[in-house]
Image (tube, helix red, strand yellow):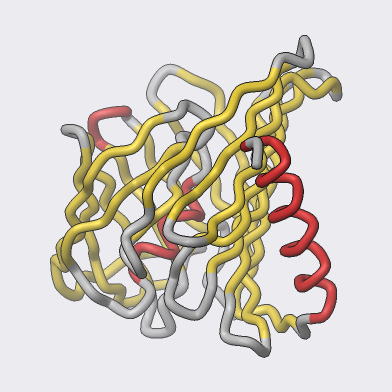
Amino acid sequence: MPLRSAVSLAFLALTSSTFAIQWHTIDEGTFAVTKTGQPSVTESFKIQKGDDGSTRATAQVVSGSQTINSLLSVDSTGMPTHYDVTVAEHGARTLRVVAAGRAGRLTAQTVNQRGDESMREYPLGQGRCLILEDGLLHELYFAAVGARPGIFQIVNPRTARSAPGTLAAEGLEPLEVGGRAVTATHYALTSGGVRRDFWVDALGRLLKVSIPSEGITATREELPR
């Protein structure tokens, strides 16, 4: 079967099954993102749990004239099953990536603003694969699920990159979020020479992200409710 047909069929199957799942929200918030020498960015996200054990995250990032919308779903083992990200400039779509995970692989289809299509496949390691895109910091939530430090395969479908990464637990640390003090667990995810530090609360909800090499800091506007 051609890759395009495989992705289309997988997408339709996943979309149909998604409508049958009952979802409840386990976290929702907004990051204020600062990057050295650039205007501030907002990233609003929602994490939901399905009655079948799956989890999905939706988000919108607004940076000047650019808007990014994303949807990421993983199954009960943490394996990515569906990914859809759209980039728009001044309201006009410039890029869309749709990916489906099944049978140990992630198949991604990219369509640019001219309508040109490209396909790529990534092998998936069971339960240790993480989709992580530049500019979508909320996706780090999935790195800390289960609190199992170790090796991940990190896939960035938008830039067609895949590389190993190592997650380490750095212990409990005090933070200030929305003017309130809280104790959070500090994790560090290192891949390709880039270290992403992030902090989660006792329920695994993402509170803060820091990427020192890129001058990026993101803190929630208020504590999770």
Looking at the image, which residue is at 74% across and 19% down? 94
> Toward which corner of the image does residue 201 lie, by quadrant?
bottom left
Q: Answer left or right for 194 relative to 79.
A: left
**Image position, residue 45 (x, y; %):** 64, 57
Of residues 6 and 136, which is closer to you in this image? 6
Looking at the image, which residue is at 42% across and 59% down? 104
Looking at the image, which residue is at 44% across and 38% down? 156
The quadrant of the image that shows the N terminus is top right
Q: Answer left or right for 176 relative to 95.
A: left
Task: Work out which residue is located at the far front of the displayed protein and give it.
Answer: 1
Looking at the image, which residue is at 35% across and 67% down? 126
Q: Is residue 1 above or below residue 205?
A: above
Q: Is residue 59 above or below residue 92?
A: below
The quadrant of the image that shows the C terminus is bottom right
> Toward which corner of the image does residue 107 lie, by quadrant?
top right
**Image position, residue 117 (x, y; %):** 68, 21
Of residues 64 and 131, which is closer to you in this image? 131
**Image position, residue 178 (x, y; %):** 51, 63
